[in-house]
Image (cartoon, rainbow, N blue to C red):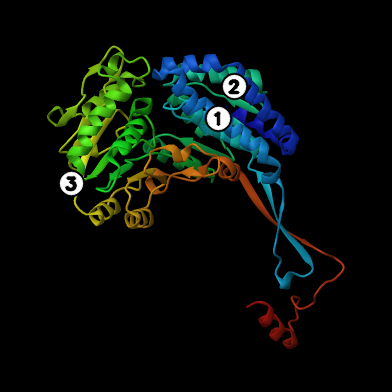
Amino acid sequence: MKELVQKQRRFFNTGTTMNIRFRVQALEKLKRCIQNHEKEILCALQKDLGKSSFESYMSEIGLVLSEISYMQKHIYKFAKAKTVHTPLAQFPSRSFVKPAPYGVVLIMSPWNYPFLLTIEPLVDALAAGNTVILKPSAYSAYTSKVLSKMIKECFDERYVAVVSGGRAENIGLLEQHFDYIFFTGSQNVGKQVMKKASEFLTPVTLELGGKSPCIVDKSANIKLSVKRIVFGKYLNCGQTCVAPDYIYCHRSVKDKFLKELKKQIQRQYGVHPLENNAYGKIINKKHFERVLSLIDPNKVVYGGNFDKSALKIEPTVLDHVTFADKVMQEEIFGPVLPILTYDHIEEVVQNLHTMPKPLALYLFTKDKSIVRKVTTRCIFGGGCINDTIIHLATSEMAFGGVGESGMGNYHGKAGFDTFTHEKSMVDKKIWLDLPMRYQPYKKRYYKMLRGILK
């Protein structure tokens, strides 16, 4: 691993990746490679997570191709030096900001969206001019194998390389000196990544998770709200970092909400979801057992059945849940939806202030005053009003967490900026040199200086 990092550093130091045309060609090569291997990617995602081709393209491949197209369109503008205002005290000169890549980047990706969350940050890092080492998850073994094959076909390992393996390989990579680390995964592993990065003073982006609340106000359009909540919660069998973790429902509409929730689950996943080939599975036995342990049989009002051999758990709804219940002590990351109730929106705001900052927040309401209150006073990574998870499906907005749910962001321009250091530069002219800054300081310049610097 040390040799691989050094090999990439030597290649970076040649200046090859500084050329914008080189970066554009690399992105085009990656796009063609993805298109050529699309069937293999879809097959791997089906084996790892039980995803249908439609879901895999919608939530992984399509988003990556969209990000590549966006970068190809905007990269010349993003990489261009930008002139900024120069203070009068620095006359005559030109001030400008020059984007520059960090160098050798490590991207560590998770198993829940193994293609998207490996390749999308790669796109941003390459557009910014870095070399990259990818470390996909060992849990999503089929997708990781396809990724390794694709990258070897597409790039020289001096430029982009894949390191396969599990915990030992993760630890080995984190012992190396990188110029930037981009990590997506759990909070516990994120802490380890940050600790290791601190030994080299390496900057990091941490895309983590948390318990993302979904607030349903009494003014909400219940039928449409439930339709969108069911989509966001049970997509990828609930294994989505921005999935609604729990429902915080106004007491007056809870019964109506629950009734519609049961109808909508059946409408989207059928009466027997475990037999639905388009409904995914839990990644492995360890996580299957963990999710099952969060289900209190006494509080199940819908679903609750499972197929251990297929690692499938039905879309499940829990009622009469409190913040003291086990299901509320950790991020669920599975197809289990607890329902909590509230009476006043101020109660919701105050409770959220006492909890770790979530990656996402969703609010269903027609009341604009409630929208203003929640979006202004609650701290969270991002979210939607009257929908779920779609805020991450655009290159025009940054995506990332805050506090316990992460630091830093990416997508589009924000992704380019994440993997870029901006050099602040002053080009001082030599045809005039004002004497006031040099010693010995003279009183006649003091008043002039105070007039300029105020």
The spot of residue 213 in percent (x, y) is 31, 43
Residue at label 2? 34
Q: Mark 1: give few (<14), some (14-19) or many (20+) Cα within 10 Å.
A: many
What's the residue type where badge 3 is placed? Answer: Ser
Q: In which quarter of the image is the N terminus?
A: top right
Q: Which mark sits nearer the N-terminus, 2 or 1?
A: 2
Residue at label 1? 64
- Nearer the observer, 154 or 377: 377
| Label 2, label 3: how far apart the Cα atoms are | 49 Å
- Tell me if label 3 and label 1 are in contact, CB under 8 Å: no
Q: Quadrant of residue 85?
A: bottom right
The spot of residue 202 in percent (x, y) is 54, 43
Q: Which mark sits nearer the N-terminus, 3 or 1?
A: 1
Residue at the image point whose x is 66% and y is 41% from the top:
74
Residue at label 3? 252
- Tell me if label 2 and label 1 are in contact, CB under 8 Å: yes
